[in-house]
Image: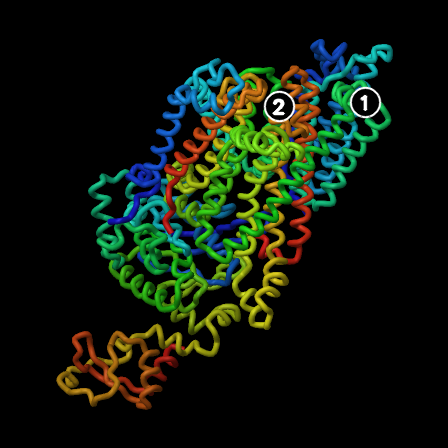
Amino acid sequence: MNQRPYPLAAAWQLNPVWLITLGWVLCLGLAVWGMPHLEGFFRWLEPGQRQVIYQRDAFAFLLLNHMQLVAVSAAMAIVIGVGTGIIVTRGWGRDFLPLVSQVASIGQTFPPVAVLALSVPLLGFGAKPVILSLVLYGLLPIMRNTLVGLNDIDPAVRESARGMGMSPLQVLVRVELPLALPVMLAGIRTSVTINIATAAIGSTIGARTLGDPVIAGLINGNLAYTVQGAVLIGLLAVTVDQLFAAITPKRHG
Amino acid sequence: MIELIGVTKLFGGRAAVRDLHLTVPTGAFCALVGTSGCGKSTTLRMINKLLPHDGGQIHIDGQQISQFNEQTLRRRIGYAIQSTGLFPHWTVAANIGLVPNLLGWPKAKVQERTRELMALLGLDEGTFWHKYPSQLSGGQAQRVGVARALAADPDILLMDEPFGALDPITREHLQNEMLRIQSRLRKTVVFVTHDMDEALKLATHVGVMHEGRLVQLASPETLLRQPANGYVESLLGSQDRGLKLAGLKTLAEVVQPDDKWIGTAARGQTVLNLSDSARTALSAMLWSGQNCLPVRNEQGQLVGEVTLDQLCRLSESKA
Amino acid sequence: MSVKAQTNRVLLALPFAALAALWGLDFVSVQPNRIMPGTGQSLVAALGWPGALLLSGGVLAILLNAWRITSPRFWLTLALATLLLALLPLALHWAAQRHVPADQPIARIGLGAGFWALVFLLCLMIIEVLQRLRAGTHWRLLVMAVVLGSLFWFISTGRLDELALLREYQSRSRQFGTALRGHLMLVGGAVGVSLVMGFGLAVQILRRPSWQKPVLGVLSFFQTIPSLALFGLLIAPLSALSAQFPWLQQFGIRGIGWAPAVLALIGYSLLPMVRNTWVALDGVPAGVMEAARGMGMSPLQAFVRVRLPLAVPVVLEGVRITTIQAIGLTAVAALIGAGGFGTFIFQGLGQAANELILLGAIPTILLALLADMIFTALAALTAGYRKEVATS
């Protein structure tokens, strides 16, 4: 049989997408490890500065911290977003469906930077306000796509699932969620992409991320710092995006 | 046996079904016919508790359905719908094995049952086992839908316009399959359709519904001969009722097989089968210009002949 | 527009939350000057009992009205919520009169969490009611006009001068104007350029479908790169360029400033622009184009008079997405010295001055919402009589 099993099993078959992903991961690792060894290049780029390699924190530390920030907030946003999406599509929660879907789409017009900035008067400086705004903002695409995914399921499928004697929980877990998964994954992908970018800006409010070298470079007029941070942020974003491309299941049709 | 006693269903204060009395004996094939919005699908969906009923009682084999847990009830009742409702993320085999799996059958038994059903519905195991619903044609998907409904060998089968979305040729093919399967399995079937011809062809009992009421419940022949009112008549189509009636009769009911015919050769013309309907015979006569045609049995031997006169009398009798 | 008499759980939950926020959180804070942190004031402390009860009474009325609500009573809730929102400036005025003596020109009133929660929840109530009533755009505009009208009247008559946000504004009203102009010009420039370029690319893709994958691939790769990184990466080549050709600096093309900002903004804007324009042009039913050609239109006529007009609503959707995105990204561009409202945000963050942050963040949000409204309305206007195409 040349049919691909559906859905996640497909991801584990060796696939060119996985090779590309692996390539990006290697690139990122190499860049983190090798950045201090490129002193010659950065000295050429910024001849006027005494120090051309960002020293305050190790790049690996900043990378891990950045990823941790995004991962924690993504996990929270997924739980809240998917949970809300499920609650408002069944039982008494359905009353809240119109409002929630409206808020999800209006909320996405808010610029992420503004949300980030508004969290400071609330929570002060540090990682906490960054996580709050990452969760709040990252929530919206996940919630919206969960709603779209659940909504797009052929009513006949849900009807027949019930008609065959599946319990509401079985219908949700075995039919609705697997069918909505590709759309939900797309929402999570959007959310994480935005949050990697926002977390970088988060270093202006005291979170320690890969944005630190960029900001430090801009403040001190040290182009080398800025480039080091920017390259790493860009690589991280592309790598994670590629990872999502790899795990997104292909639909049959 | 399914009994509906004074069943009523309200949608926002409006009665979609009112005071419906309907008994479907064990092994009967009951078709509910009517225009869209007449309450036939609602009635069907109340039987497996997909919709709660607001008044009256529904009994299955003498027990009120309100006493059953709804999931247990539904796993005992086969259910097939128009757009099949196959799970797009499961293979054909997984779809068919759904209810047995829900009932916790051992894996080997589920597989065996799935094989059995694919054979029954004429789905080649090698071709279809690993296919996904999106890779099937409409007719194939509908076969899988019927197989899935039959999977746990339920006594009762509910079908909601299962062949409604198919092209006429595929539909007729599946109707014949349905007749064949029903003659073997003898399930108690409630079958919703808006196609009167389909109902007359398949059902032993035809219930005509109009504006939430059961207007008439009768055998196909009685329905054709004695429609309860103008509405039933309009559904039957007043002009070709004779043809429809003829369609219900096989030549076996008209021709007395006589051994004296055996061995004689047909004179190079149209030959009818005993299993053909009187309607087919009439059509053959119109086409060939003969008013008398020979008839043969399943073995291909001539056993008698049928005349136009006989066919005409067929429609008058018992009038 | 008839709505069944049914208890609306949303309109029970929202006012309940609003009451909890009003009584549980600080309504305003009072600051003796710009530097000192404010002291929080509860609702009663801020407004006194009459004001506190009046405000709570209004919210309570909405809560009670949700019980077995009917269509006419939805309108009542809409009116109540709008009225409350429109009267909030008055509440702030009262609070200012109670807590800021006239002889302290630098004392100021900050907005508390309770106030913001109330505004947010009232907005949610209005959104909910407008949706349940299926009220048209003109109702939405009317509500907004009432609320904003009241706000501007209170501001322009000087009744809200004690508000920290306004004090902050007054001390830099000239910079505010410059920031607004800068923000609009960056956004307008980037969106305008990307509209023209995006249109060209979309037409190319339409003509040569083999271009679709590479073009969209490259553009979505751009889209993936975080703004801070792209801004940072553009500085190096641009400063090298301007070092090489000093005359470029006369036009403001340097490593930092508006040049890398505009380049990055255009890069980000191209993807939504190209994708929507292409989808729009491609989505015109083949039958319609066939008919146009069959009637004897030249290819150019068919394109300009049939394909293009039918595609406009979806193209406008692309412009909407692009504009909103550009408004947000321009705020980030302040980090590389491009100006705009982001300047206030990052200055505020640097000085830990909350009101200055708000002075940058709120106008940015308002600009985005305004752009959203304008382009949604435009798309609806152009799609009015051809819904079937706009849905593609």
Which residue lies at the image location 17% right of the left edge and 78% below the top edge?
B300
Image coordinates for residue C256, horizontal then vertical, percent: 60, 28
Residue under pointer 1: C160
Residue B216 left/right relative to B304:
right
Tell me which chain the residue with mark 1 is part of: C
Which residue lies at the image location 55% right of the left edge and 39% below the top edge?
C267
Tag nearer the camera, 2 or 1: 2
Viewer-proximal residue, B153 or B317? B153
Residue under pointer 2: A117
Q: Tag 1, which secondary structure?
A: loop
Image coordinates for residue C157, horizontal then vertical, percent: 86, 26
On the question of residue B10 being in view, the answer is yes
Q: What amino acid is found at the position of numbered circle 1 in the picture? A: Leu
The relative height of residue C286 versus residue C117 in the rendered view (above or below) is below
Residue B258 position by quadrant: bottom left
Which residue lies at the image location 68% right of the left edge and 40% below the top edge?
C130
Q: What amino acid is found at the position of numbered circle 2 in the picture? A: Ala
Image coordinates for residue B129, horizontal then vertical, percent: 26, 50
